[in-house]
Image (cartoon, helix red, strand yellow):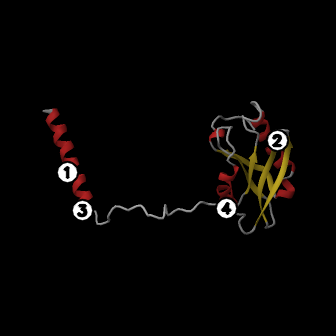
Amino acid sequence: MLMHFRFSLCLALSLALSALHAADPKPAAKASANGPKWKKLTPQTPAGFTLKTIEVAKYPEHTVELYVYVPDAAGTWPCILDIHGGGWKARQVEADKPMMERLAQRGFVTALVSYRLSTEAKYPAALHDCKAALRCLRAHAKELKIDPERIGCMGGSANSVRHSV
């Protein structure tokens, strides 16, 4: 009896979904011969902001840099430090720039750190670079218009293991 009920329920759902699909007035979207209708976002410094590049540390294998979006307006702002994804082994700074630009437009100083990758220096070099970037933001807080008491960190897959910065 239970088996008959399950079969009947599955059949009823299948018929209902088929009827809904057949009644859908919108035909299925066809792929354009010209490719997808999306546009790649390329980093552009938003109006009202200045992009500053600060050298945090220089090593033979890589120069650790901070890319900071600073508002042109007067005042101090909370800051977001982005530790880009890539599992500590792939540099994805450029991929995170559009996101940081949008966050900057919402009232933040935003910064991205270009840390040494695991293919360039052994653990915990990348963590040391991220901590140095945070210290650099605090040290340059006045010129970058940062409220040093309001600095937060965010990040992608490299940030999945939490460490104290």
- Location of the N terminus by quadrant is top left
Q: Position of residue 79 (x, y in %)?
A: 74, 53
Q: Amino acid at mark 2?
A: Ala
Q: Tell me, for residue 23, which label it has, or none.
A: 3
Q: Earlier in the sequence, mark 4 or mark 3?
A: 3
Residues tagged 4 and 3 counted as in contact (Cβ below 8 A): no
Q: Residues within 10 Å of mark 1 (few under 14, many from 20)?
A: few
Horizontal arrangement in the rendering, residue 158 relative to residue 115 (left or right):
left
Under mark 4, the amino acid is Arg
Horizontal relation, residue 118 to residue 59: left or right: left
| Element type at mark 3 | helix
- Residue beneath label 2, please? 132
Residue mark closest to the camera, 2 vs 3: 3
Outermost residue toward the bottom in this view = 47
Identity of the residue drawn at 17% across and 39% down:
7
Q: Nearer the viewer, residue 88 or 127?
A: 88
Residue under label 4: 106
Q: Give the percent coordinates (x, y) of residue 138.
A: 83, 48
Outermost residue, front side = 33
Mark 4 surroundings within 10 Å by alpha-carbon count, few (fewer than 14), some (14 through 19), many (20 or more): few
Distance between mark 4 and mark 3 Cα atoms:
43 Å
Disc 3 marks which amino acid?
Ala
Report which residue position mark 1 lands on. 15
Q: Secondary structure at mark 1?
A: helix
Answer yes or no: do the residues labelled 1 and 2 have beta carbons within 8 Å?
no
Instruction: Say above or below: 32 vs 162.
Output: below
The residues tagged by marks 1 and 2 sit, at their Cα atoms, a distance apart of 62 Å
Q: Residues within 10 Å of mark 3 (few under 14, many from 20)?
A: few
